[in-house]
Amino acid sequence: MSKKPTKTVPGITFFTKAANLLILNFLCLICCIPVLTIADSLASLYSVMLKIVRGDEDEVVKPFFRFFGKNFVKSIPYTIVMVVSFVLILSGYIAFAYDDNMVAIGLLSGAVIIVITWFGWAIPLFAQFDNGFFAMMTNAMKLMVMNLRESLIVLIMNSYMIVLFLVVPAVFVYVLYIWGFLGLAVTARVVCDQLVPVFDELMNKSPEGEEDGE
């Protein structure tokens, strides 16, 4: 007797996807609290999301913690460089704000854009490939320059809350509540939709490079 094809119920599928986003967002935020685990937490989120986008993963909790546990040590350089970069830039803003040095502020703003976009590529690369820190950061820079459309989307998705805070602080407060539930996961989903074709092309050129640290 042949089996009847299983029908997908649109409502259930939607709520399952929404629940997965909520869970991933919560896990990522909680695991970022120790600060030293920021890069590991973000990379774990992207590791799961890359598989979800490809249709290779339905579960979210176990693969998140599997990646998180195996790549903590590898993630430390990313966290240190990321945190130090933003601390230095923020210190520069504070120092030059008092002098109204618009040239310096403009340069610092450019640095923020580069750092956000650079790490916006580096973290998903870390989630997908098993290379050393310097090789990964170099590849992230190359891909950022070679894929300007994707880089623009990466920048927008990773900086819209900062822009909202600076431009419309009253709205930022309300959006922050929603972001707390879904922001990181939705950002990862949109970014992964853009980066998966790029990563797949890289893996087709170099099959041995398909190693995501798990």
Image (cartoon, rainbow, N blue to C red):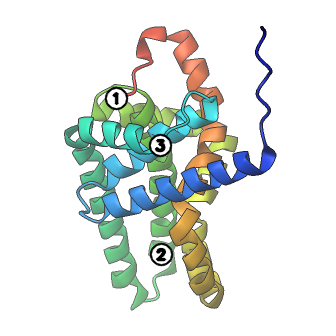
Q: Earlier in the sequence, mark 1 or mark 2?
A: 2
Task: Give the number of the disc on residue 123.
Answer: none
Q: Amino acid at mark 2?
A: Ile
**x and y, in percent, of residue 197 in the image:** 65, 28
Q: Which residue is mark 1?
A: 135
**x and y, in percent, of residue 87 in the image:** 30, 69
- The answer to whether 43 appears left or right of 7 in the picture is left
Q: Amino acid at mark 1?
A: Ala
Mark 3: few/some/many CA within 10 Å (<14, 14-19, 20+): many
**Gap between marks 1 and 2 measured at Cα:** 30 Å
Q: Point out the frontmost of discs 1 and 2.
A: 1
Q: Earlier in the sequence, mark 3 or mark 1?
A: 3
Q: Which residue is mark 3?
A: 60
- Judged from the image, the secondary structure of the residue bearing numbered disc 1 is helix
Question: Is label 3 in contact with label 2 (beta carbons under 8 Å)?
Answer: no
**x and y, in percent, of residue 156 in the image:** 63, 58
Q: Amino acid at mark 3?
A: Val
**x and y, in percent, of residue 74 in the image:** 24, 38
Residue at 61%, 67% in the rendered image: 160
Image quadrant where residue 3 sits: top right
Residue at 48%, 10% in the rendered image: 207
- Judged from the image, the secondary structure of the residue bearing numbered disc 3 is loop
Q: Nearer the viewer, residue 209 or 179?
A: 179
**Gap between marks 3 and 1 measured at Cα:** 28 Å
Residue 152 appears in the figure? no
Residue at 40%, 78% in the rendered image: 93
Please state the total of marks drawn on the protein image: 3
Task: Give the number of the disc on residue 105.
Answer: 2
